[in-house]
Amino acid sequence: MPVRARLLCLLLLLCCALPTLAQTPDSAKAFDDARQQLDDIRKQLAAGDSDEHRLDEAKFGEFRDAVAAIAAQADALVADRAPRLEALEARRNELGPAPPKGTPEAPDIAAQRADIDKQRAALDAEIKRAKLLAVDSQQLAAQIAEARRANFQATLSTRTPSPLTPAFWHQVGGSLGGDVARIAGLRDGLRAALADAFAADNLPFALGGLVLGVLLIGAGRWWVGRWLMRATADRVPQGRLRRSALAFARVVVTTALNGGGAQLVVTGLDWHGAFTEVERELAHTLVVAVAFGGFVAALGRALLSAQRPSWRLAPIPDEVAERLRALPALLGVALAFSLVQRQLNTLIGASLAATITGTLAVAVIYALLIGWGLLRVGARSESEKPRPRSLLVGVGFAALWIGVVAALLAAVLGYVALAHQIARQMVGFGLLVATLYLAVHLLEDLCATALSARSRWAHEALGVDPRVLDQFGVLCSGVLRVCAFALALFALLRPFGTDPGDFVAPVGKIGAGFRIGEIALTPDALVGAALVFLLGVAALRTVQRWLLDRYLPTTRLDAGMRSSVTTLLGYVGGIVVFALALSALGLSVERIAWVASALSVGIGFG
């Protein structure tokens, strides 16, 4: 072999070996680090019980994410080491039991047995430590959830002077000088950053980003909206999918164009590094606020569809949709203002009085907007007749009115945190319900359209009755609605200190699979078995159709014998396909043979 070829082979071997060496972890150090991290979190939780070191919501989120990551790593380690331990057990069983003391054994067999026992002991110790670490992480996660709920209740019960009393405004005035000075410092920094951005060397980029961003948000959104209308009418099949697809596309496009346009403006201004870290954080917040405000406004416009009632998804009367036409834009502006105000307080280190005032303003704005919207829905002209409402809608309106009154009353009494929480949860829950409503309708319409378009192919290729496809579509719709209801329930429980992560964390362990007897059912195994079964059934149907239509008519068999041969082939092929699917699940050949024998007996009796 030439020298160059040898060098090339050596380099290839090194490239293949380096990732393997890099992936060999120091498990003892990893366990110690994870244990130390859990202990540190416990200490911070214990210290957070006092008012001086009270933890905020972001800190609890960091703790929960860290503990979840440790638990996931421990579960992954167990899943990685368990097959190795089983393989070592199989090798050890092949060697047989160790001979009694004093009985000689071949040196190579003894060496292999000692090496296997050593590796087995190391793997068993790692698995036990990982399982203990996973249990410890679960217990700490429960402690974090409990501490978060207790902190949440303590925060809501905090009371400040009422904004209707002079004491409240006296506190605001006492810290006003320092807050104004901090804002002046941020304002001077922004002026200097903008002066650098519009300097001669950065002027083309700043103007280009500004023009492109404004065009993208304004003219681009208008042009894309018209194009989406034409594309939906021309390319999407007739039916409900046209309305849901257009509404979803408008929401996505509006959000993307608003965020993209704002980001173009910021990128052009900061092309040569005119902004400092503080200005960049503020600019990033502005981009997020513009994108999120656009999302809220676009979602409301898509569901109301005041200008095009025939494209409206929700069963809203035309008069109500017209009266609520301005509400989505106002809510989007209010949410954008909330994001910017919170980030400004963080950047300038605002005083407690200023933070409370900003929180109070946001709570009152949210509550007033929701109340105004409820009034607009209930208002009607003299020519309009009273519209009957379902029980669920009536309960929803009553709950919103109670929330508005409770938020305003809590704000007046000085429970600012409680007022903000109630108002924010009403807005957030409404946005979640609207988003889920749009998403569920889109998925339902997609499933219905796809099933109706493929019903003939499924009937001919798979032998599936169209009625079965209709049942499958109804089942999918029910599953989607249950998932949407679960997400809405999580959002409804959040005001009481419960977070969706507390519910989703146990569900996430489904990804590791579960066992039924000796069979380990994992998502990839289930998906693989389903694919094997579907592909096998499709192939079997194709072979049956070819035999019945093409090959058997060329033989001397009569029609009855041809039908019997095809039916028998379907039985045998069905057993083979079912066995292959069970094999993809991890079922051993012996058990598959037993299942096949039972099926054969049943088919024989049939």
Image: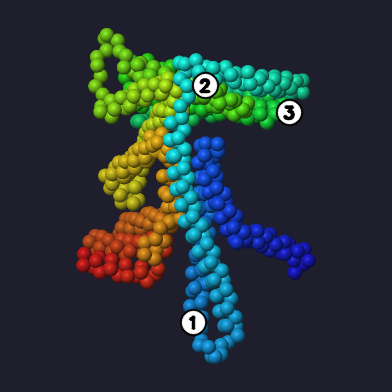
Dot 2 and dot 3 residues touching (CB under 8 Å)? no
Q: Is residue 79 visible?
A: no
Which is nearer the eye, 463 or 287? 287
Q: Return the residue found at the far right.
A: 3
Dot 3 and dot 1 residues touching (CB under 8 Å)? no
Q: Secondary structure at mark 3?
A: loop
Which is nearer the eye, 151 or 186? 151
Disc marking residue 272: 3
Q: CA distance from mark 3 to mark 1?
A: 72 Å
Which quadrant is the C terminus positioned in? bottom left
Residue appearing at x 42%, y 39% in the figure:
498
- Determine the image quadrant of residue 15: bottom right
* 530 in relation to 165, above or below: below
Nearest to the eye among marks 2 and 3: give it.
2
Which is nearer the eye, 550 or 474? 474
Residue appearing at x 60%, y 83% in the figure:
108
Q: Which residue is mark 2?
A: 357
Nearest to the eye among marks 2 and 1: give it.
2
Dot 2 and dot 1 residues touching (CB under 8 Å)? no
User: How crowded is the residue under tag 1: few (<14 C-alpha within 10 Å), some, or many (20+)?
Assistant: few
Q: Amino acid at mark 1?
A: Gly
Residue appearing at x 54%, y 51% in the figure:
38
Query: Residue 120, percent across and down?
Result: 54, 71
Residue appearing at x 48%, y 24% in the figure:
160
Which quadrant is the N terminus positioned in? bottom right
* 490 in relation to 339, above or below: below
Which is nearer the eye, 242 or 368? 368
Disc marking residue 96: 1
